């Protein structure tokens, strides 16, 4: 086998495409016996993940590179999804993250389970899996991930400063970025009825567990004021900043901000948080 296995991806550099080598070293794992690479664009995505394609396209999918690896009798697969922006990559990661055994092993936004490692870095979402689930296979997952992640330009994602508040900061690992109906259905189905008639919005949503109870804090951006007003009307919400509003059997609080933005909470929130959100 050659010393290196090189697949060229097109990476964004400013507004231009910059061709850079994406290298999976053949010594990254012991006993590699085969590596196969496949490439799928928007048109070919359906042939690869079938029913899941719409979700990725909604977030801003551009291309996926698939590495099929066999080493030491174990099968590994590394999917490298190039998305339209760091927010899009983080969004897919955030709604795919579930029951992490460990987090922040290689990069701040990653998640390790016995059978899978996922991460978001720059414009890329990574999903690397193994067929064994053994401790040895987990070590190999991290080795593959480290080799791939180190080659990605770190286009940092700016998560909203709203969530830096001392009460919210410890819960950042649960932060989700939702972009559209499928994202809401897959990432935060609890609020799917709220947003089922909304199309042009993005939402950062954080569950917060405190003192045995849970509440939810979201920063929602609409494309224009008409979309925001329609959202409130459809859900029986009024522009009453900082006041509890009971809809059905749930308590919501709204804080209207500039530029078609609102902060939305569900559940009973502490007064100190209410004051912070009102001033934000």
Image: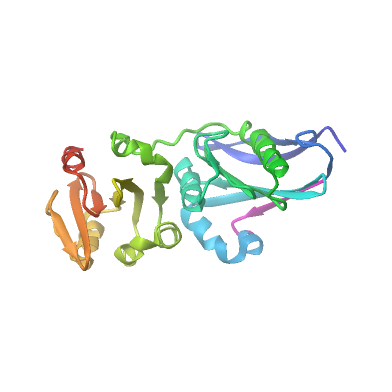
* 142 left or right of 253 in image: right
Could you tell me residue 10's position as x and y percent?
Answer: 63, 40
Q: Any magenta on residue 142?
A: no
* 185 left or right of 225 in image: right
- Main SS of the magenta segment? strand
* 212 left or right of 156 in image: left
Dividing the image into 4 quarters, which one contains the N terminus? top right
* 113 left or right of 161 in image: right
Could one spot residue 166 in this view of the protein? Answer: yes
Observer-nearest of 80 and 83? 80
Give the quarter of the image for residue 266.
bottom left
Residue span colored magenta: 34-44
Could you tell me residue 112's position as x and y percent?
Answer: 58, 43
Position of residue 74 relative to residue 2, above or below, is below
Q: Residue at x 69, y 42 (%)?
A: 135
Q: Any magenta on residue 35?
A: yes
Could you tell me residue 142's position as x and y percent?
Answer: 65, 38
């Amino acid at each position: 086998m050659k010393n290196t296995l090189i697949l060229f991806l097109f990476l964004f550099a400013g507004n231009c495409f910059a061709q850079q080598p994406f290298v999976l070293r053949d010594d990254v794992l012991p006993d590699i016996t085969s590596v196969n690479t496949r490439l799928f664009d928007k048109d070919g995505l359906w042939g690869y993940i079938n029913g899941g394609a719409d979700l990725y396209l909604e977030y801003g999918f551009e291309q996926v590179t698939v590495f099929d690896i066999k080493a030491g009798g174990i099968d590994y697969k590394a999917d490298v999804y190039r998305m339209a922006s760091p927010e899009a990559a983080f969004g897919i990661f955030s709604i795919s993250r579930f029951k992490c055994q460990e987090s922040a092993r290689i990069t701040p936004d990653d998640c390790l389970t016995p059978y899978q490692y996922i991460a978001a870095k720059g414009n890329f979402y990574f999903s690397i899996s193994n067929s064994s689930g053994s401790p040895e296979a987990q070590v190999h997952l991290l080795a593959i991930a480290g080799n791939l992640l180190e080659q990605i330009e770190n286009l940092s994602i700016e998560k909203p400063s709203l969530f830096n508040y001392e009460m919210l900061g410890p819960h950042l690992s649960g932060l989700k970025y939702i972009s559209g109906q499928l994202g809401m259905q897959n990432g935060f189905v609890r609020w799917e009825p709220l947003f089922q008639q909304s199309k042009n919005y993005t939402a950062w949503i954080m569950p917060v567990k405190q003192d045995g109870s849970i509440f939810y804090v979201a920063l929602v951006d609409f494309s224009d004021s008409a979309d925001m007003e329609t959202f409130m009307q459809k859900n029986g919400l009024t522009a009453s900043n900082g006041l509890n509003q009971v809809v059905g059997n749930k308590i919501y609080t709204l804080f209207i901000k500039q530029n078609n933005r609102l902060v939305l909470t569900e559940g009973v929130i502490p007064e100190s948080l209410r004051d912070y959100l009102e001033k934000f």
